[in-house]
Every structure is written in C-alpha cells, then in structure tokens.
Image: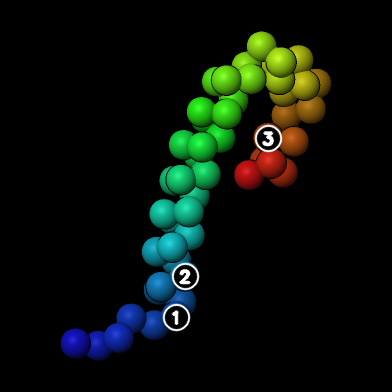
C-alpha cells in the first residue's frame, strides 16, 4: 500500500484539527456568551484570531 504523501497527511489533519477547534470554540463561546457577546459585536475579527 502506498504511503500517503506528507501534503495529504497534513490536509487530513488540518480538517480534523479545524473540526476540533470549532467544537471547542463553540463550547467555550457558549460558556462565556454573556461575557463575550459585546466584544464579538465590537470586534468580530478576534473570533478568527482566537482560532
């Protein structure tokens, strides 16, 4: 069986990592929704920087 290339390996891991980060971020955001909602409205860019 051909060994997957490093590029394919990284791509697959990026998909998994992104999914995990979205789940974790959603849980954290839900827990802190009342605290962070004002910051999210004022500066939505920090959401992407946090990920």
| Distance CA(mark 3)–CA(mark 2) | 24 Å
Label placed on residue 6? 1
> How far apart in space, not on screen, are marks 1 and 3 (Cα)?
29 Å
**Residue located beneath label 2 in the image:** 10
| Residue 46, position as x, y percentages in the image | 74, 36
Q: Are marks 2 and 1 in contact (CB under 8 Å)?
A: yes
From the viewer's perspective, is 43 left or right of 51? right
Mark 1 and mark 3 lie on one chain; the one further toward the N terminus is 1
The C terminus lies in which quarter of the figure?
top right
6 lies above or below 36? below
Q: Is residue 25 visible?
A: yes
Q: Is residue 14 above or below residue 26?
A: below
* Residue drawn at 49 percent across, 49 percent down: 18
Q: Give neighbour class at mark 3: few <14, some 14-19, many 20+ (Cα, 10 Å).
A: few
> Toward the viewer: 6 or 34?
34
- Would you name the residue on which mark 3 appears? 47
**1 is higher (above) or lower (below) than 31:** below
Mark toward the start of the polypeptide (3 vs 2): 2
The residue at the point 40 percent across, 73 percent down is 8
Residue situated furthest bottom in the rendering: 2
Q: Residues within 10 Å of mark 2 (few under 14, many from 20)?
A: few
Coordinates of residue 13 in the picture (x, y in percent) = 43, 63
SS at circle 3: helix
Q: Quadrant of the N terminus?
A: bottom left
Q: Position of residue 47 (x, y in %)?
A: 68, 35
Residue sitting at x 51%, y 37%: 24
Question: Gap between marks 2 and 1, in whole Å?
Answer: 6 Å
Identify the residue at the far left of this view: 1
């Amino acid at each position: 069986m051909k060994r997957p290339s490093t590029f394919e390996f990284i791509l697959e891991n990026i998909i998994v990592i992104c999914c995990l980060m979205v789940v974790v971020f959603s849980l954290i955001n839900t827990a802190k929704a009342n605290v962070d909602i004002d910051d999210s409205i004022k500066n939505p860019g920090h959401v992407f920087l946090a990920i």
